[in-house]
Amino acid sequence: MGTLLEPAVLLLLWQVAKLKQYIPLPTVRQPPTIIKQSLKEHIVDPKDTMVIECEAKGNPHPIFSWRRNGKYFNVARDSQTSMRRRSGTLDIYARNNPGDYEAEYQCIASNEYGSAYSNKIRLQLSRAPVWPREILEPVVVSVGLPLVLSCDPPPGPPKPETYWMPFNWPIQTAFPTMQAVRQDRRVSMGVNGDLYFSNVLINDSATDYCCNARFPYKNIIQQKMPVVVKVLTTRTVAEAAPTWLSPTGSSSSVMVLQGEELFLECIAAGVPTPHISWMKDGEALSVTSRMRVKNFNKMIKIPKASFDDAGEYVCTATNKIGYIEHTITVRVKAAPFWLERPSDLILAPEENGQLVCRSDGAPRPTIRWFINGEPIETATPQPNRHVSGETLTLRSVTVANTGVYQCNASNQYGYLFANAFVNVLHATPRIMGPRNELIKVIEGSRIFLHCRYFGSPVPDLRWSKYGQGNLEGNRFKTHGNGTLEIKRIKVDDQGTYLCIVSNIAGRDESQVRVEVKEPTMIIKRPQNMKVLRGTDVRFECGVKHDVSTPVTTSWMKNKKFVTLGWRISLDESNLVITSVNRGDEGNYTCIIKTEMEQKSASAQLMVMDRPDPPTDLELSDPYERSVRLTWVPGDNNHSPITEYLVQYDEDDWLPGKWRNLSTYPGNLNSVVLQLSPFTYYEFRVIATNAIGPSRPSRPSMRFQTSGAPPDVIPKNLKGVGTWRNNMEISWEPLTYREWNGPHLKYLVWWRRRDSREEWKNATTKWLKYYIYDADTFTPYELKVQAVNDFGLGPESPVVIGYSGEDRPNAAPLNLRVSDIQSTEVTLHWDPVSRSSIMGELKEYKVYYWRDSSQLRWLSVSRAMKSKAFPGSDPEPSGVLSDLFSYSNYKLYIVVANNRFEGPPSNTIQFSTPEGVPSVPRSFRIQQRHLDTIYVDWETPAEPNGIITGYSLKYQTVNATRGEELRVEEFPANVTSFSVRRYDRYTRYRFSLAARTQVGIGEWYTEESPHYTTEAYARDQVDITTQGWFIGIMCAVAVIVLILLIVCFIKRSRGGKYPVRDKKDISLEPVDDKDQEGSFDYRIARVSTLPYPRREEERGLQRGQESVEAMMKRTDSDDSLVEYGEGGEIQFNEDGSFIGEYTGSRRDVREVDYGGSLELHSPMNAIYSLA
């Protein structure tokens, strides 16, 4: 409060009536003035420090004192109270006895020039909002009768807000919500907090009712004990005419003070629920903007009552049985209110002054005057002071008239209290505020040159330009407070202006320099825009201004300055917004500011976007298969809503799986939803406009439809026997949504077909039912229906089921084959009689296997295969395909029903003729020299007959000379071929197939690889010239020579089996020659080296078959040739062969050699040396 002490403040207001305004002067005396005080009705919390405010100013600073209940209150002597320093604010620390301080307080601020008084402040303690403990008996009422549940909350202060909530024992929802009892025309809460039922329904007992009171001062809620309502249904609901529940009787009256809230309420009972209508002064009530009709027309609320609201109000309750009226007389009174408050006066000696205290009220208030808190009637008389009702007049004032005057206007409903001081003093004229100011103004504007001054008596004031003349008239006007007003200022008005004040005590002056500037104008204003979210926006703001005046540009959005960033930027004075969103919507203002003026231009930005989600979803009118859903539409964001999508969630185990229910036009917000019975539902709504769909709304409360009998027929009913004398009746279950009620079961019906027996039935909760002691494969009529606690569902159509099947007791006869081909054969058999099948004929099944190949040397798999054939043909037959050619097959046939196969028929044999062979095996392409490609292959895996030869096609694939396709034919004993390349870059494509007498088989195609790198060529050429390789070859030759010598020695010692006599093969030299020389029988014995056959064949020329290869295809297993092939040959002690030479022999000389033998490797040369 130190700032209030230095300097003292006076405001002098110059007016014709001599009323003055405060003028701040540090040395001028001033009586006290109350500047802050507590409310007249002051409610405090006794648990906290109780504070009563009182602040005042004056010069010298005032001292403070208090009155309590009209008597002096000694604060210093009360240990629980204190006053703040340099303030009158009172702090009360009454922890133990706060009730002792509930009283009426008044603050007094005094200095040597008078005393100012505050209002009388009534201190009240906020009471602990505790509901009285009571045991509430259940309220028993018959259906159709009215009911009133009283609330009676704690009185306060302050008065609490009341509302009713349902109370469940226990809470049955997983997440209970604070939701008030829903009010409608039948159920409503009165002004006094009671809950009124115009008539009671049976479902009103579904919940208990709890009254809650909210105390705004402490913001706490107190809850009353719940009230249990029991509704009796022993009597039928009879229609009844309306009767009044509140207010009672035919008339009542209400008195309200002006400015307070006025409530008019009429609540009626009756069956059906009555409708309420209002009249005022004999005419239908005209609802104005000051009036609110609430609570389904049962209440009229006027927030601030006025005298126009007085009159007679008639409320009428009507239903189809009759009507009733009630008249409410409204009287409006008024506590005193100000018309004119007394104002402070600063007067010079011998001046006159008036204090006016004008007020009104109903009834009219009385006026009393006080001086320094003392009634003016008992104060020291002053001849120049005169009181006339609401006016106090002072003539030719003196210093003795200085003081604080109080005015009190009161009637029975309240009072007004005001302080006004009279300060009589003598002072020299002074000009206050800054001197020698420079003021810059805009041409054409209005300017005010202030010259605040003070003096007593009132000084004379004069304005001039450059100290010459007197400015008054036309565009110049001097106000009573010293301000010079210049209208529509021009450039010529630029210059220095002088303010002069003077009285008999002295003179003072001050000057002001004025500069006139060209006005600033916005020549291009921003335009209103309506854009889609995500687009770019540019608000333009073009400016024209005085070149000597700097200009700053800023933008505001909704009266707040725009923060610039990466998305919102300035381009000169233009605002650019990229990728606008909903948050950018609003009113944008371009502000052009100079040191003299500020111009602005605004534009509205509307961002079209998807709508906001709907809110406040409510469910009503529940039935078995429907409920009404109502919602509050969200903001459409400048694009009309075209439709609403209602989604539902019915999964209790996995919530959150929302499904679409139905769509509705965008002009609806209340729809009836078609649902399934006995199902829990939650709903949410999605709004859609031209931009897109909104976010989903918050889910509605969980809701369960009531039950109903099933309306779905179990699907896929069938009867199948699982044993020879039973039948399993099965069906598909109903989904949980199709139950329509609890405890779903199935009622199964059956009887023999074509019999007169009654239907038999059984109820089960399973999906199967078994019938026992049935005959084998007997037809039954079947039907099923679902049933729950609410009744039976529809019956299914009758279906035919069969009891169990037994094993067939007969086999098909006369199994035979015809039309035998290389890969398929046609079967025929005689059908089995129906009686021996012992069930439904399913099929005939043939079991067959490949017993052997007609090629004795080819081993085959004897795996059994089967193939089923339908049995509907009177002369059954079938085709077995995918057989192997040139093979021996066996087969038999059985008959089968749905469960068993019968005994097998007789087994028959057949042989397939030759066919075309499969592809040759192990086709390989090799390069022995840079200019030669070598290919070889093996016999096909499935010859499908006797191989008669091979066909080989080849052609270059990378040559440019266009070489034609070449074809080579080989006999069956030739399995290799070589071809010379034109260069080392030439590649070939080879295709190979085998032949039988039937024809040529499947072709196998492969291309030769790339043999083009220099590294490969260098390896092929240089390896034979390496020293290490020559040394190894020499060592190998020596070892071979030694082994041959040892072999001959061992053979010559044996003597038991002369090989030359035993063999049919001539060992004479062969005439066939090649480029390297001839081969004799010793060549055949080179293979006695311990090398595998594969390595030996790599060392020999593949273009022609060797003698050993030809002998390999004979049936001899122990010949010398076979021994040369590396077979496992046993010797006895003298070196002779063990075993017999059996099978036919072919003379080597009979073999046709189609080509020459070439030595492609160094090994061939070594063999020739042997």
Image: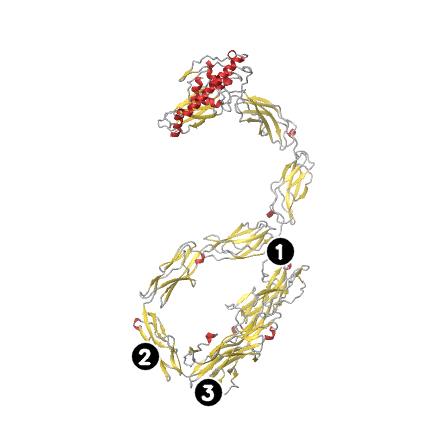
Q: Which mark is residue 239?
A: none
| Marks 3, 1: nearer the viewer | 3
Secondary structure of residue under mark 3: loop
First reached walking from the N terminus: tag 3 or tag 2: 3
Badge 2 crowding class, 10 Å Cα cut-off, few under 14, some 14 to 19, many 20 or more, is: few
Q: Position of residue 1098 (x, y in %)?
A: 45, 23
Q: CA distance from mark 1 to mark 2?
A: 90 Å
Left or right of 322 on screen, residue 340: left
Query: Under tag 1, what secondary structure?
Result: loop
**Residue 951 location in percent, x, y?**
44, 22
Residue 834 visible, this angle: yes
Q: What amino acid does circle 1 point to?
A: Gln
Quadrant that contains the C terminus: top left
The residue that label 3 is drawn on is 384
Say which of 653 and 1043 sits in front. 1043
Residue at numbered disc 2: 470
The answer to whether 725 is drawn above or below residue 1094 in the figure is below
Q: Nearer the viewer, residue 723 or 1124?
A: 1124
Residue type at mark 2 is Asn
Can see residue 1108? no
Q: Which residue is mark 1?
A: 172
Q: Is residue 799 above or below residue 27?
A: above
